Amino acid sequence: MTTQELVEQAADLLAGLDRLTVLTGSGISAESGVPTFRGEDGLWRRFRAEELATPGAFARDPKLVWEWYDWRRGIIVGVRPNPGHAVLARWEEVFPGFTLITQNVDGLHPLAGSRRLVELHGNIWKTRCTAEGVVEENREVPLSAIPPRCPRCGALLRPHIVWFGEMLDRDVLRQALEAGSSCEAMLVVGTSSFVHPAASLPLAAAERGAPVVEVNTAETPLTHLAAVSIRGPAGEVLPRIDEALCSRRKRGAPRRSRRGPSPS
Ligand code: BV8
């Protein structure tokens, strides 16, 4: 099947829906110039995550961990959201029950205007005081002091990010599970579907019969479960799905709330 035929299939599945949930990974920011985790330019190739994105690594060497985040902030401050981010921000108007769940900490979705957003793993532009737990925005690039310290109590600040081996924020996880269990369909963009609990969201949706649409430049463990899996860069494929949806709206395709899978 051609990519355009798959795009039309995806649009048929999504057209007129009310509750659409989207899950994104670092692949959606690749075309903006943000390194993915496992790609050629992946962070993993230079640094093993277990060495850096863990509470143990921070306890052992907070300076090294902050140098890594300062390096990533230096890359991210210089890039812009791409058309893939823009389509998802616009879809908040198209789908009344729209929720965007991202694993990305790069802040490009909010920069693109996304508001109905769940940042599962935190945000690289926020710090947290290791003593008081106070979370604050910090956009200083480069950081003047590494490691940065709390202006109130002088304790170490840490990135307000979920590290491996750490539980996700309870409210954030609840919002994600709710959006995953009530959606009529789930669109999964630019993720290797490897890290849990994020990777379990589309599995649970598919299990209860909600169609999963995947957009990725490569196959993933999710591909065989997807109703439609489109191979291509998110920044090109999402605008094509959006266009196909627009033409259906113009043709006056009826709004339909899929009676199928009831929210579990
Ligand atoms: C937890 C913040 C309780 C840090 C991140 C069940 C089974 C196995 C393991 C576990 C399990 N449950 C828990 C675990 C342990 C662990 C885990 O999942 N480990 C993995 C490695 C197996 N999970 C946890 O620790 C979680 N906490 O569960 O707590 C607990 C604790 C201990 C034990 C049990 C339970 C916390 C996980 C969160 C960690 N923090 N990020 C930081 O950023 O600094 S995860 C981080 O890695 C990202 O946020 C993201 O989630 C993941 C990377 O994945 P992707 O974003 O998908 O990126 P990747 O490079 O892999 O893939 C990119 C994809 O895009 C590719 O498919 C590529 O083809 C595609 N692509 C590329 N370009 C494009 C494209 N697609 C479209 N267009 C393009 N242009």
Image: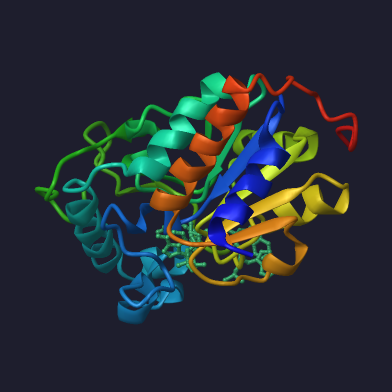
Q: Is residue 14 left or right of residue 55?
A: right
Location of the C terminus by quadrant is: top right
Q: At which x and y percent is residue 171? A: 63, 33
Residue at point 60% right, 37% down?
Answer: 172
Where is ligand 1, by quadrant? bottom right
Residue at point 38% right, 65% down?
Answer: 36
Q: Is residue 3 left or right of residue 146?
A: right
Location of the N terminus by quadrant is: bottom right
- Which image quadrant for residue 122? top left
- Which image quadrant for residue 20? top right
Can residue 129 be seen in the rendering of this structure? Answer: no
> For this rendering, which residue is in front, 45 or 48?
45
> For this rendering, which residue is in front, 196 or 1?
1
Q: Is residue 27 left or right of residue 247?
A: left
Residue at point 62% right, 54% down?
Answer: 5
- Which image quadrant for residue 19? top right
Can residue 49 be seen in the rendering of this structure? Answer: yes
> For this rendering, which residue is in front, 38 or 127?
38
> For this rendering, which residue is in front, 205 or 9?
9
**Vertical comparison of 140 with 214: above or below:** above
Q: At which x and y percent is residue 142? A: 11, 50
**Vertical comparison of 68 with 187: above or below:** below
Residue at point 67% right, 71% down?
Answer: 221
